[in-house]
Amino acid sequence: MSTLRIGMAQVDLTVGDFDRNVELVLRRVGEAAEAGAQLVVFPEMTLTGYMPEDLVLRRSFREASRQALTRTAATLAEAGYGDIAVVVGYLDSDCGARNAAAFVQNGEVVARYFKYHLPTYGVFDEDRYFVPGTELVVIRFGGVDVALTICEDVWQDGGPFTAAAAAEVGLLLNINGSPYERNKDDIRFPLVARRAREAGAPVVYVNQVGGQDELVFDGDSFVVDAGGRLLARAPQYAEGMFYLDLEVAPAVSNATPVVGDLRVRRVDAPLPPRALPAAADLPEVGIAERLVDEEEVWRALVTGTRDYARKNGFASVVLGLSGGIDSAVVAAIAADALGGDAVHGVGMPSAYSSDHSRSDAADLARRVGAHYQVVEVEAMVRAFVHALKLTGLAEENVQARVRGTTLMGLSNQHGHLVLATGNKSELAVGYSTIYGDAVGGFAPIKDVPKSLVWRLARWRNDDAVSRGHTPPIPENSISKPPSAELRPGQLDSDSLPDYELLDAVLLRYVDADAGFADLVAEGFDPALVTRVAHLVDAAEWKRRQYPPGPKISYKAFGKDRRLPITNRWRESRAAR
């Protein structure tokens, strides 16, 4: 057996920022060189950032990616790291756009691998952008055969891993831009372990961290041996270099089999691995523990909010603080993401706002260290209502729209990013006011069901207590019945089912695409199913105008779920 010291680069990338991404590669390889790494592996589309979407269609963008790869190889050699093998993801334009991985050493691109399986489900549209590869590239590096694969290649049967088994490779590298969603590792890790057993070789799985628009990447890079046993795991949401000394079987074959429509191509690395330093010098990653569900989700929301603000040039955020659970949780997320001093809360009481709403909002701001101001909106609301002679729902909506206009005015004046505070349950059934509480540039809990919002609040407070800190969310905001406070005595329960029951129906109807008959067969009341389905279907136009927010579920509103607005299909008894 041969031993390779492998560095897994779990990095936060920025789409289109080639200079920064190249510099990041150089810096991380420099760290890896000091740790004695012989092979450093970066995530999918490292140089472009992931996902670049329709930027892929631009010839100028594809050419910039190829130039960035050439520059990366040359710069690494000039910096004295030419003998380190570096695997980096990029965008190629060989016979069409390609999602590619490059094996770089000695100042040159030794080999290029093009992704074979292109995902076309959920948030992925890769068949729209890329031409699939036709070769499995195997690099002989220091007497070890190393095969390159990319993300979806591990999720589909056949293809690269089957070809790797036929070629008797000693090691597979799988580079990823795999977005976070709850419980994904319950599927991902067993799948990678199975592929390792199928190929008869260890697999190094490297994923990125950070936020990109609505996607969040949690890292969670890991290594399994040929039997699928976990050898190392990097922590979630942690950017950095993580190392492992991995025993790899020496090359035993020069075969170039063809498996289906995929052929094996072999390439020799120009230089052998650098000599290993003493084992005691290695800062090994070990096996990081998985986070509990609430912490995993909370950190996804914090990461998504932080990176959306930072990467789009916002140093501060503004949001309405109503004293309710949703705005309290969003403010706490923003404070964790950017620091309390960057959070500007605005209380906007109207004639129907309760005393506890005012005091809870001020208490929340103190707890998270946010700025807080009160803007009395009643006179503005009265002016609209009187001028337009509004009553009922129209009057209620004016209150929300005046608040939305107030927040956008403060955003324009001070350069804050406006955070919308609606949750997935409300968004699903249209329980929000367009151009009112739906305004904003980013919506941190857009994909969080209301029942989970409460769980997250309790977890965050408990976590603060366990660390000796002040719980950020007032207990009264958690325990009181939710209300929009747009009319006297109003409660959410006046208009909606109990949130636990509503969320159970939404999980099946929205996330799982269950129909009326499916839901009734599962025990849900037919009248409830019809009512909820009608509310969801009727609110599609509102959701199209809602700000982006971090995806945490299997099916978030946005790219995951694409339904027509003009649509006569209804899930009801008559539609069976």
Image (cartoon, grey):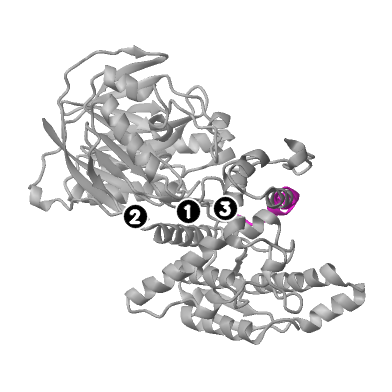
Q: Amino acid at mark 3?
A: Ala
Q: CA distance from mark 2 to mark 1?
A: 12 Å
Label 2's element?
A: loop
For disc 1, the neighbor class at 10 Å (few under 14, some 14 to 19, many from 20) is: many
60 above or below 408? Answer: above
Between 405 and 462, the residue placed more toward the observer is: 462
Q: Is residue 14 left or right of residue 266?
A: right
**Residue extent of the magenta highlight:** 535-548
Under tag 1, what secondary structure?
A: strand
Question: Label 2: few (<14), some or many (≥20) within 10 Å?
Answer: some
Residue marked by disc 1: 211
Q: Nearer the viewer, mark 3 or mark 2?
A: 3
Between residues 180 and 442, which one lies in front from this camera angle? Answer: 180
Q: Would you identify the image quadrant in which residue 434 lies?
A: bottom right
Give coordinates of residue 214: x percent, y percent: 54, 51
Q: Which residue is mark 3?
A: 504
> Which quarter of the rendering shows the C terminus?
top right
User: Does 493 sit above or below residue 217?
Assistant: below
Q: Residue at x 62, y 78 (%)?
A: 346
* Amino acid at circle 2: Glu
Q: Which residue is mark 2?
A: 239
Chain-order first, disc 3 or disc 2: 2
Q: Earlier in the sequence, mark 2 or mark 1?
A: 1
